[in-house]
Image: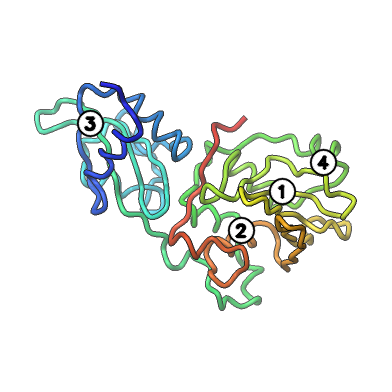
């Protein structure tokens, strides 16, 4: 049978919204299912390989997909997307036959890991915003860290770069937060005459920049240049800014009005 996105949508609808799993019909190529899911949700993370569960897997990293299958799971790859986890892999059925499965589970970001609108400035210095961003998006995979020659990049650009931005690139790689806010792998310099470096952008042509004032890039704050050319300053560093526009509905340019939970859609494996 010819596998289409509509077929996958139908299969997902059969296990959502309550969640659970189903055995994929035998006439479907499991790799095609994975490829179609990857085309929509980005590259998956591996939760289980040859029966061994990644020890870092917990509720913030897709463990809910494994619960209904128990110890029958042989392989499981997962995507974080909005308010649900989607997974595909193999599991043993009641007769101990290994079969392809498709699983869906509800996804929630723990309340303590979201950014409170009234969080006081006195606490900001204690927050690792890159780590928090990973938890908010369900993305915490050391094996996805990129090996970037930042000395070469900074020499070519002509300036040092904020340390939290460099950690974000190493942690997430190529992709977009909520499939919308695209993270550049190195800043663009076409606004340098305006003392701006561009580190991210959106499909609405908003540009997320730093105002490059002072010698310490870790003190640079974010400026958003909207599609109509307006510069909107924020007194926030890079990772904190992303955390807040993901979760705080009162922030301008927020995505919290559209999504209750958040994810990072990767555009492929790290270079």
Q: Looking at the image, is mark 4 or mark 1 earlier in the sequence?
A: 4
**Residue located at (53% from left, 69% from top):** 249
Q: Earlier in the sequence, mark 2 or mark 4?
A: 4
State how far apart marks 2 and 3 are (Cα): 37 Å
Residue 225 located left or right of residue 6: right
Answer above or below: position of 30 versus 202: above
Q: Which residue is mark 4?
A: 154
Q: Label 4's element?
A: helix
x and y, in percent, of residue 230 in the image? 76, 62
Mark 4–mark 3 CB contact (< 8 Å): no
Assess whether mark 3 and mark 2 are in contact (beta carbons under 8 angstroms): no
Name the secondary structure under disc 1.
strand
Q: Percent x, y for residue 54?
A: 39, 39
The secondary structure type at the circle numbered 3 is: loop
Q: Which residue is mark 2?
A: 242
Mark 2: few/some/many CA within 10 Å (<14, 14-19, 20+): many
Residue 14: percent from the left, percent from the top? Answer: 22, 43
Name the image quarter holding residue 22. Answer: top left
The circle drawn on residue 24 is 3
Quarter that holds the C terminus? top right
Check disc 1: other Cα within 10 Å, few if <14, some if 14-19, many if 20+. Answer: many
């Amino acid at each position: 049978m010819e596998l289409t996105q509509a077929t996958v949508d139908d299969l997902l609808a059969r296990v959502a919204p309550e969640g659970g799993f189903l055995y994929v019909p035998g006439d479907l190529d499991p790799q095609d299912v994975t490829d179609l899911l990857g085309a929509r949700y980005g590259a998956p993370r591996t939760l289980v390989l040859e029966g061994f569960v990644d020890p870092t897997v917990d509720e913030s990293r897709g463990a809910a997909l494994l619960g209904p299958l128990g110890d029958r799971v042989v392989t499981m790859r997962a995507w974080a997307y909005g308010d649900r986890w989607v997974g595909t892999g193999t599991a043993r059925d009641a007769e101990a036959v290994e079969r392809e499965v498709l699983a869906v589970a509800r996804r929630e970001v723990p309340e303590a890991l979201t950014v409170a609108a009234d969080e006081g400035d006195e606490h900001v210095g204690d927050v690792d915003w890159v780590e928090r961003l990973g938890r908010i998006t369900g993305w915490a995979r050391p094996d996805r860290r990129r090996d970037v020659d930042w000395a070469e990049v900074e020499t070519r650009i002509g300036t040092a770069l904020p340390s939290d931005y460099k950690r974000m690139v190493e942690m997430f790689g190529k992709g977009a937060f909520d499939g919308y806010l695209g993270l550049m792998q190195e800043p663009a310099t076409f606004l340098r005459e305006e003392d701006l470096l561009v580190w991210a952008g959106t499909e609405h042509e908003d540009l997320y920049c730093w105002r490059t004032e002072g010698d310490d890039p870790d003190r640079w704050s974010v400026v958003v240049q909207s599609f109509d050319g307006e510069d909107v300053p924020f007194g926030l560093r890079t990772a904190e800014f992303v955390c807040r526009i993901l979760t705080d509905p009162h922030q301008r340019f927020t995505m919290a009005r559209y999504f209750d939970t958040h994810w990072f859609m990767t555009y492929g494996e790290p270079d």
